[in-house]
Image: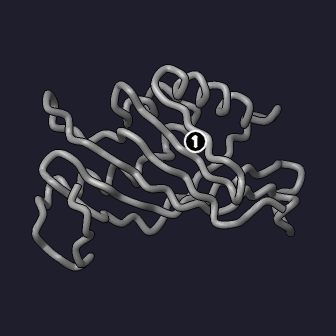
């Protein structure tokens, strides 16, 4: 990727690739939030990596097979006894840089594990256990074999510190 970001309003990019990247990032949460982890893994390259930053804590990093093991376990532990699965709300998708076979994109993501006992009128952050918003930055690449864009790695930065 070029070191300097170009103006966000430039039009010097491949439109079909741009739409595919936006669709990839916009689709990020759907398979995961529908308990289809194998379909979610298809959004990633064969050796995916995630880095997470939560306030002033040391970042964590998981990659390769450990990435898959971690997220299988995390998803399973997130589903409550009634089968309610948390939701990710992905917004403000922005392509920061785009080349022929790689790109950087970002999006704001809110993770909401909602408990059935407080439905239909949740009142507080504690009652809904809203984890909070985070800025996700994605490094994506275009497959040479099939031309599909996939997430190679991404970083999660939570906007707020620990409570």
- Horizontal and vertical percent position of residue 112: 69, 54
- Horizontal and vertical percent position of residue 122: 83, 64
At horizontal 50% and vertical 40% (from top left) the residue drawn is 50
Relative to 122, 102 lies left or right = left
Quadrant of the rendering where the C terminus is positioned: bottom right
Q: Which residue is mark 1?
A: 33
Q: Secondary structure at mark 1?
A: helix
Nearest the viewer among 32 and 62 is: 62
- Horizontal and vertical percent position of residue 140: 31, 46
Q: Is residue 3 above or below residue 32?
A: below
Q: Is residue 135 above or below residue 25?
A: below
Nearest the viewer among 7 and 32 is: 7
Relative to 132, 100 lies left or right = left
At horizontal 46% and vertical 34% (from top left) the residue drawn is 40
Q: Give the quadrant of residue 61.
A: top right
Colouring style: one colour
Relative to 108, 10 lies left or right = left
At horizontal 14% and vertical 61% (from top left) the residue drawn is 15
Nearest the viewer among 82 and 114 is: 114
Quadrant of the rendering where the N terminus is positioned: bottom left
């Amino acid at each position: 990727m070029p070191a300097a970001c170009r103006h966000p309003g430039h039009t010097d990019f491949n439109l079909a690739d741009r739409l595919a990247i936006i669709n990839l990032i916009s689709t990020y949460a759907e398979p995961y939030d529908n308990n289809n982890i194998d379909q979610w893994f298809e959004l990633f390259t064969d050796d995916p990596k995630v880095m997470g930053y939560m306030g002033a804590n040391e970042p964590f990093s998981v990659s390769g097979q450990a990435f898959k093991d971690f997220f299988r376990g995390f998803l399973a532990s997130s589903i409550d006894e009634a089968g309610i699965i948390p939701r990710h709300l992905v917004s403000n998708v922005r392509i920061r840089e785009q080349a022929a076979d790689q790109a950087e994109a970002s999006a704001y993501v809110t993770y909401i594990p909602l408990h059935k006992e407080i439905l239909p009128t949740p009142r507080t952050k504690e009652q809904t256990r809203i984890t909070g918003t985070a800025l996700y930055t994605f490094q994506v690449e275009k497959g040479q074999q099939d031309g599909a864009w996939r997430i190679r790695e991404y970083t999660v930065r939570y906007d707020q510190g620990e409570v």
